[in-house]
Image (spheres, rainbow, N blue to C red):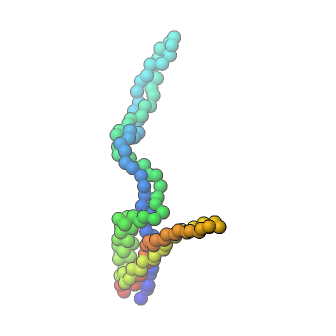
């Protein structure tokens, strides 16, 4: 029996927006009249544009996970294992965390603040060979 492990990282959510933009999808050749004193026709390539919805990324979160993308990554990893002759026996999540704190003091007072949170960094998938 062979044991295999696969690490699947949980992606952070991507921030951005959709817009409808003019996108160059090709070009065409046209004859253009050139010259001031002696006119002549020259072939030139001009771009062809089409309106398309385009995603504009503005970066990634440092605290929100993309659950839908994470699920698809896990599904693909399991399918690849099964296709390779393995059977999943366990999925183990790895939890990470972040925190921040600070304090200030003066002769008459002092105060502090802090916060912390945890998130699933990813999962380890443990599988064994079917044979």
Residue that lies at the very extreme toward the bottom in this rendered image: 1
Considering the image in quadrants, where does the C terminus appear? bottom left
Question: Toward which corner of the image does residue 91 lie, by quadrant?
Answer: bottom left
Residue that lies at the very extreme toward the top in this rendered image: 37
Q: Position of residue 94 (x, y in %)?
A: 45, 77
Q: How many marks?
A: 0
Residue 102 horizontal side relative to residue 68, left or right: right
17 vs 8: above or below: above
User: At 56% across and 68% down in the image, what residue appears?
Assistant: 111
Considering the image in quadrants, where does the N terminus appear? bottom left
53 vs 108: above or below: above
User: At 43% across and 22% down in the image, what residue appears?
Assistant: 32
User: At 42% across and 55% down in the image, what residue appears?
Assistant: 15
Residue 75 horizontal side relative to residue 58, left or right: left
- Between 20 and 75, the residue placed more toward the observer is 20
Question: Toward which corner of the image does residue 31 lie, by quadrant?
Answer: top left
12 vs 118: above or below: above
Q: Position of residue 40 (x, y in %)?
A: 47, 17
- Between 9 and 130, the residue placed more toward the observer is 9
Question: Toward which corner of the image does residue 23 lie, by quadrant?
Answer: top left
Observer able to see residue 80: no
- Between 79 and 57, the residue placed more toward the observer is 57
Q: Position of residue 12 (x, y in %)?
A: 44, 63
Observer able to see residue 30: yes
Q: Position of residue 121 (x, y in %)?
A: 46, 72
Residue that lies at the very extreme toward the right in this rendered image: 107
């Amino acid at each position: 029996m062979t044991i295999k492990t696969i690490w699947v990282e949980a992606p952070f959510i991507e921030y951005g927006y959709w817009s409808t933009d003019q996108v160059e999808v090709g070009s065409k050749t046209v004859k253009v009249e050139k010259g001031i004193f002696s006119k002549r026709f020259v072939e030139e390539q001009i771009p062809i544009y089409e309106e398309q919805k385009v995603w504009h990324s503005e970066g990634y979160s440092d605290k929100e996970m993309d659950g839908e993308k994470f699920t698809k990554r896990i599904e693909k990893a399991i399918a690849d294992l099964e296709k390779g002759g393995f059977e999943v026996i366990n999925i183990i999540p790895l939890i990470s965390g972040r925190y921040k704190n600070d304090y200030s003091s003066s002769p008459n007072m002092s105060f502090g603040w802090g916060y912390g949170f945890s998130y699933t960094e990813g999962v380890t998938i443990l599988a064994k060979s079917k044979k």
